[in-house]
Amino acid sequence: MSAEPARAYIGIGEVIALLRAEFPDVSVSKIRFLETEGLIQPARSPSGYRKFTPADVDRLKYILTAQRDRYLPLRVIKDQLEAGEELPRPRRLAVHPVPNNPDPSPRQASRGLPAGLDGFEAGGDPGALTRRELMDATGIDDAALAELEEFGLIRRRGRHYPPQAIDTVRAVMALASYGVHARHMRVLQAAAERETALIEQVVAPILRQRSPGARDRASQAAREVASFTRQVHTALVEMSLADAGFGDRGTGNPEQ
């Protein structure tokens, strides 16, 4: 038997709870964005949840401090980390081992996050779906649904899925008929996380007000900004398609 001690893993919700006192703007989307940019590389559980070590938390703390106090862009921070430069060691945050349950519970994963910015909590949404209900509503099989979860295209809390999962699954299945599969959609996931990070930056000043109703106002503002970003995104895609020669919506030959 190996003498190496078990590693102390914690979930992303617990990381948020550890960092939020010093970094009020930290969020799940912010951490996902940093991962997308290659600044952190947390391990994954068999079910796809991120698993953070104390070293991961220290690295996050350094990155957030460098952004806030030294105004360094992420590219510079990443270059420093990759170059192995001697960086100031932040105060180590206390992290308690969770050896028998590396996956965050539904309440751990959503603890401390702004309402409306991190999906839903199991049992809190009357439209929440069980796995069987989602499969029956969309016709997707278990293996295909598991693949969507593995690639982060569908997320659940505990045993339930948000009602929006039905539209997502149907859209993904339609794309599959064109040969576009889950593995091809990483670019869409990355784009969504970037947009969410932008939205969170916009509403952060509202959250910092700490006045009655601030969280509700931030949630409303986030949804409004998200609506506008979707409009811009759609317009940009339309223009790009037009530039590529696919923008004509008529039935005739555009060159005639």
Image (cartoon, rainbow, N blue to C red):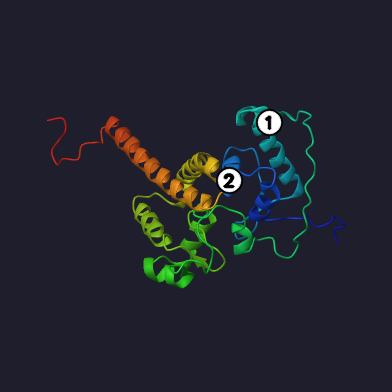
Residue with the most extreme right position: 3
Alpha-carbon distance for marks 2 and 1? 21 Å
Under tag 2, what secondary structure? Answer: helix
Q: Which quarter of the picture shows residue 37?
A: top right
- Amino acid type indicated by mark 2: Arg
Q: In which quadrant of the rendered image does the C terminus lie? A: top left
Residue 120 horizontal/vertical position (percent): 51, 60
Q: Position of residue 175 (x, y in %)?
A: 36, 52
- Which callout, 2 or 1, points at the residue further toward the start of the chain? 2
The 10 Å Cα crowd at callout 2, few under 14, some 14 to 19, many 20 or more, is some
Picture coordinates of residue 165 (x, y %)?
A: 43, 60
Q: Quadrant of residue 6?
A: bottom right
In this view, the residue in front, 105 or 174, is 105
Q: Where is mark 2, residue-wise?
A: 32
At label 1, counting other C-alpha atoms closer than 10 Å, the crowd grade (few under 14, some 14-19, many 20 or more) is few
Viewer-closest of 147 and 58:
58
Give, as a three-letter code, the residue at label 1.
Answer: Asp
Q: Residue furthest front?
A: 212
Q: Secondary structure at mark 1?
A: helix
Q: Which mark is residue 69?
A: 1
